[in-house]
Amino acid sequence: MSDFIEEALRLSPQNAPAWLQDLHEKGRQSWKTRTFPTRKTEAWKYTNLRSLERGAYLGEPRFPEDHEVSESTLRGQFEIAGLNATVLVFVNGHYSSALSSRETSLPEGVELLRFSEASDRQTGQIKAHLGSVANREQHMFAALNDTWLTDGVFLHVAKNTRVDRPFQIVWLTMPQSEAFSLSQRMLMVMDEGSEASVVEHFVSDTAEQNNFTNGVTELVLGANTRLNHYRLHLEQENALHIGGVHASLGRDSVLNSFHLAMGSTLKRVDVVVNHHGEGAECELNGVYLPRHQQHVDYHTCIEHAVPHCTTSEVFRGIIGDRARAVFNGRIHIHPNAQKTLAELSNRNLLTSDKAEVDTKPELEIYADDVQCAHGATVAQLDEESMFYLCSRGISRTEAEVMLSFGFINELVEHLEHESISNYLRPMLADLFAQDQRLVRHIA
């Protein structure tokens, strides 16, 4: 047992609702039996957790004092112009009513609350679903999340409720005098026939971070539901994050999920989608952009357990400088999942001869009447395209920016909410060129 596993058990939840004690105990029992991953652990072969062990992230997160930062400064870190969302904001894991807007804007048929605010009826709903999708035995950091959990977000959309206004759940971090850890947890339950959009927004201020976030999101989609889901990892590069999104899809449900991650010292995101109802559809797209000496790791697993379901998965990465990216995409077709249509594509662009990507697309098929495909590519900027742009009077430096941005723009451009595309586009353009004159065609 590593020192980190022992030390993590000493961080007991503070001010957690009493009804979470059973979850805490199950998490502790699962966590303390684990062996810390090494390079010999297949699921962690290319992701080193040494920075997590060395960091001593044992401090308690606290809300910044009023004199430390202004409300307008904090709001500027996460506002998305034109999104018009119902916003719930946490700063270093603590809820901020001043920065949130849910109190005045919840539509009929929607419940958005913290676990600590739940009534007896709502507590019953939460307990019925919490931990039902995220498997702590398969995902060890889900067990740690159960162990540390003090509060979380519960979002419930009632039967046949269509919510036009998106929900934006913001997790904002700021450095403290000592390194600290926090748990992020969200449970979303959609009843039959409902529709909604949710943005999970992880962001930090511009200061060098000294925090570790352990996050778990569970999405429970009932029959004939539709969810547009966005998960944006925009933390400062010294922030550590290990998280997971776990979804259960009911009959004829539709999940459109988009993921974007800037690099950091350590960033690992597991995405697990379970097709539990016939006719379910999943469109899963993602972009990862590590640079400097950053690290990003996406592990996705799509479980097709029933017939007549569809999956389309596309992830693209641009890796620069001495950064490293890891992508492991698995589609598992169970014996009863006949008539499945599933496709997986992972394309990577290396903009430096020191950059590295380890990609592993997988198909595991136990049914004989399916249509499945998968593929992965690793390449550098195309010289013919570069020559074409330069021959039209565009400088080579500007051409490099345009080609890099174009590699991922297809996924960003076609997001369901244009305001999110507009929010990300200039941010991504700035990532490729510090000189604003080089991004005049795309920002």
Image (cartoon, rainbow, N blue to C red):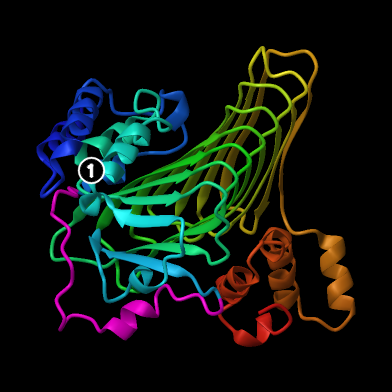
| Residue 67 is one of the magenta-drawn residues | yes
Q: Position of residue 323 (x, y in %)?
A: 50, 53
In this image, 174 relative to 43: left or right?
Answer: left
130 or 358: nearer the eye? 130
Q: Residue at x 59, y 37 (%)?
A: 223
Report if residue 92 is visible in the image.
no
Asked if residue 84 is positioned above or below residue 261 in the image, the reply reads: below
Q: Residue at x 28, y 23 (%)?
A: 35
Quarter of the image that includes the N terminus: top left
In this image, 341 relative to 183: left or right?
Answer: right
Q: Residue at x 36, y 65 (%)?
A: 88
Q: Position of residue 381 (x, y in %)?
A: 74, 59
Quarter of the image that includes the C terminus: bottom right
Assign the magenta stretch its main secondary structure.
loop
Going by the numbered disc 1, the residue's amino acid type is Asp
Asked if residue 358 is positioned above or below residue 228 in the image, the reply reads: above
Q: Quadrant of residue 364?
A: top right
| Residue 15 is one of the magenta-drawn residues | no
Secondary element at image label 1 = helix
Report if residue 227 is visible in the image.
yes
Q: Position of residue 263 (x, y in %)?
A: 47, 57
249 or 325: nearer the eye? 249
Asked if residue 378 is positioned above or below residue 202 in the image, the reply reads: above
Q: Residues within 10 Å of mark 1 (few under 14, many from 20)?
A: few
Q: Which residue is mark 1?
A: 120
In this image, 18 relative to 351: left or right?
Answer: left
Q: Position of residue 230 (x, y in %)?
A: 54, 56
**Which range is magenta?**
56-82
124 or 363: nearer the eye? 124
In this image, 273 relative to 307: left or right?
Answer: left
